[in-house]
Amino acid sequence: MTHDQRPPPAVNLPRRLLSLDALRGFAMFWIIGGRELLLGIAGILHPGAFEFLETQLTHKKWHGCVAWDLIMPVFLFAVGAAMPFSLGSRGERKRPLKATYLRIARRVALLWLFGILYQQFRNGPAPLELFSNALQAIAVGYLIASLALLHLPALGRLLLLAALLAAYDALLTSVPFGGNPAGTLEKKANLALYVDQLALGGFRRDHAFAWLVPGLSFSAMVLLGTMAGQLMKARLSAARRLGLMAAIGFSCLAAGWLWSQRLPFNRYLWTGPLVLWAGGWGFLLWAALHWAIDLRGHKRWAFPLLVIGSNALLAYIIDPLVYRSSTTLGEMCFPADSAHRAMLFSAVLELTFIWLVLWLLYRRGKSFRV
C-alpha cells in the first residue's frame, strides 16, 4: 500500500463525549419546561406560529407521529448510546460477570422503584401502578440491551433487534384476542392493551398506554442506541464515523416510514415503525452534535444542555414537583385571559429552578446514578 492509499487516521475520542450529554440534555429540556417555554413565547409573539408549534408539541391522539412523540424514544436511544462506554461489550470485559450482573440488577430495580414512586407522586392518591412509567421502560430496555452487549457479537445484536421488532409486529397484527380479530388496533381494543389489562388488572390506570408487550420495542429502542454508541467508540476517521451515522440515520427513517404504511406510528403502543423513525432521528441528531461539539469544539452554546444531560434522570424525577408548583404560581400571577403569559412564566420558573439545581451538581462534578 502506498502512502497515498493509507486510510485516514482514526480519531481518538475524548474520555467523555460531551455530545452524548447534549443529546440527553436536548431530550430532557423539552420535558422539564422547554415545550411550554417555546409555546408561551410563540403564543405572545405570533399566534400563527403558536398553532403550528402546538400541533408539533402535542401528542397524537392515536395513530401518527409529531415531534413531541419522539422525545421519550430519543431519550431511550440516548440511554442505550451511553451503555457501550459505561458497560463495555462482549469483547471488552474488564470485570467479573457476577459484579456486572449485580450492577445491572441494581440499576433495573432502582429504575423500577423510582418509576413507581414517580407515578404515585405525579397522579396523587391513586391505586398502585406496577408498570406505567418511562423509567420502567428504560429498565426493561436496559436489561435486555445490557445482556446483549455482554453476550452477543455485533451481528447477534443486530439480529436480536430485528427479531424484537418482527415479533412485536407479528403479535399486534397476527394474534386474535378477547373476541377481536387479529390486527385490531383501536385505542381501547388492541393486543398490547389486552395483555396489560389481563396481567396488571387493578394495578394500572384506565388509559390507552400499553407497557408489557411494548417492552419488546423499549428493548429495541435502547439496543438501537447501543449500536450508535458502539459506532462512536470504533476507531474510525471523523468523516467515516459521521458518514456512517448519517447513513444509518437516514436508512432508519426510510425503513420506519415505509413500515408505517403497513403498521402505523403509534406512541401508545410503541410500534416498530416509531422505533425506527425515532432511532433515525437519534442517529442524525447525535451525529450533528458530535460534529459541532466534540469535533469542532463549539461547546459554549451547548452548556445549558450539558448541565441538564449530566443529570438527566434526576431532572426527570424532580420535575413533577417543580412543574406543579410553578404552574400554580403562574395561574395565581396571571388572569385567565393571559394563558400564554402564565405558561411562559411557569416554564421559566420550572426550567430555572431545575437547571440551577443541576448546575450546582455539575460544578461539583456530582452525578445522580442509579
Image (tube, rainbow, N blue to C red):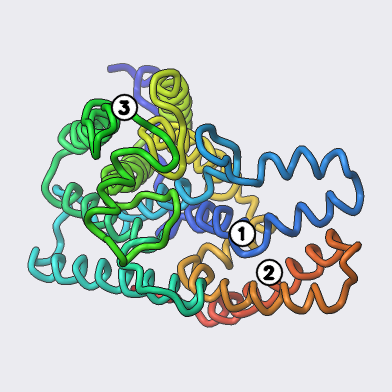
Task: Determine contact: label 1, label 3, CB under 8 Å.
Answer: no
In front of the other: 272 or 245 = 272
Residue type at mark 1 is Phe
Task: Determine contact: label 3, label 2, CB under 8 Å.
Answer: no
The residue labelled by disc 3 is 183
Quadrant of the snapshot with the C terminus: bottom left
Q: Position of residue 268 (x, y in %)?
A: 44, 45
SS for dot 3: loop
- Is residue 179 in view? yes
**Labelled disc at residue 351:** 2
Q: Position of residue 145 (x, y in %)?
A: 24, 50
Residue type at mark 3 is Gly
In front of the other: 183 or 261 = 183
Task: Determine contact: label 2, label 1, CB under 8 Å.
Answer: yes
Judge left or right: residue 76 versus residue 358. left
Q: Is residue 195 shown above or below 287?
A: below
- Is residue 231 in view? no
Q: Position of residue 362 (x, y in %)?
A: 55, 75
In front of the other: 158 or 117 = 117
Residue type at mark 2 is Leu
* Residue sitting at the far front: 179
Judge left or right: residue 290 versus residue 279. right
Query: N-terminal of the two: label 2 or label 1?
Result: 1
Residue at the image position 15 percent from the left and 52 percent from the top: 150
The residue labelled by disc 1 is 29
